[in-house]
Image: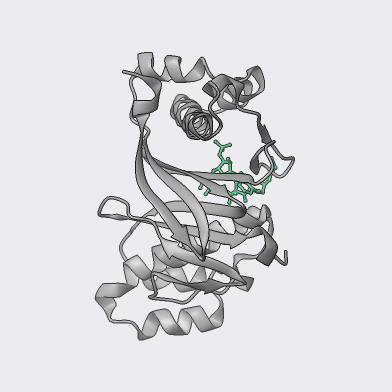
Amino acid sequence: MPLASTAATCADTTAAGADVAVRLVDLTAHDEATARAASVLTPAELARARRGTPAVHRRRVLLRAALRVALAAELGVSPGAVPLRTAPSGRPGVEVPGLDVSCSAGGDLGLVAVGRDCRVGVDIEQVTPWTTDVLGERWLSPVEQCALTRLPATARAVATARAWTQKEAVLKARGTGLLEDPRTTVTPIGQQAGTVAGWSVRDVPVPEGWVASLAVARNEERTR
Ligand SMILES: CC(C)(COP(=O)(O)OP(=O)(O)OC[C@H]1O[C@@H](n2cnc3c(N)ncnc32)[C@H](O)[C@@H]1OP(=O)(O)O)[C@@H](O)C(=O)NCCC(=O)NCCS
């Protein structure tokens, strides 16, 4: 199996006037395919991947290789030659002006996003049954909690997962991740697209039972 077949393009999209390609990545590869993916990673990337359990190792290798494959296609170089870096915050970045990347993994699914002339963040999450316990988990603002409880009961599970992915997508686009209190990033509960803290957010199509969000801001529009 060629390395590139671990990723399938799921959306080449224009969000907020920005040019973003998002790929869905199959993270179920067998050992041979994982070893092939590992061959394009740097020693530092391999060392980081090895710090996890076998499942985390495989996920990290496949996701990082998918990032490299997506960027290699963009830059016309081999995946191993992509100047992909990791900031001290953990945020991935590419040393090419105008290009930005983000990635996420959930179970056996991964997402990689490549933005041109914009900053991007992506996140994927499995939908789990709604319970009121969510309201005590301290990641939703009071306004979001109120909006969630006003939704029909059947809509709350997806809306909760989407609120999480929209927040994480924005926090990853910023580069702060969960070092920032997620309650201060307020999402439009129940909406597949909108504006969150100045970032354009929208659903990314993923298999049933999952929700994924993309956050984008064009470079000239970004305030923080
Ligand atoms: C960003 C963050 C929310 C992602 O957590 P998650 O939901 O468990 O993981 P996801 O699968 O959705 O995303 C993981 C990817 O996000 C990226 N990422 C990590 N930190 C990031 C950050 N600060 N900003 C943007 N992207 C980040 C990485 O590429 C990571 O993939 P990797 O683990 O294979 O390197 C979480 O890692 C975080 O809050 N990190 C910042 C705070 C922190 O602990 N920093 C430590 C410095 S090393």
Q: Residue at x 66, y 58 (%)?
A: 219
Q: Residue at x 54, y 82 (%)?
A: 142
Splitting the image into 4 quarters, where does residue 84 fall?
Answer: top right
User: What is the total number of numbered labels drawn onto the structure image?
Assistant: 0
Q: Residue at x 27, y 55 (%)?
A: 209
Image spot of residue 9 (x, y percent): 36, 41
Q: Is residue 100 above or below residue 134?
A: above
Q: Quadrant of ligand 1?
A: top right
Placement of the N terminus among the 4 image quadrants = top left
**On the picture, is 165 further left or further right than 118?**
left
Tell which of 155 and 38 is nearer to you. 38
Q: Is residue 143 above or below residue 99?
A: below
Placement of the C terminus among the 4 image quadrants = bottom right
Q: Residue at x 33, y 73 (%)?
A: 156
Return the residue found at the far front: 76
Image spot of residue 130 (x, y percent): 33, 68
Splitting the image into 4 quarters, where does residue 131 fall?
Answer: bottom left
Colour convention: one colour
Q: Is residue 75 above or below residue 190?
A: above
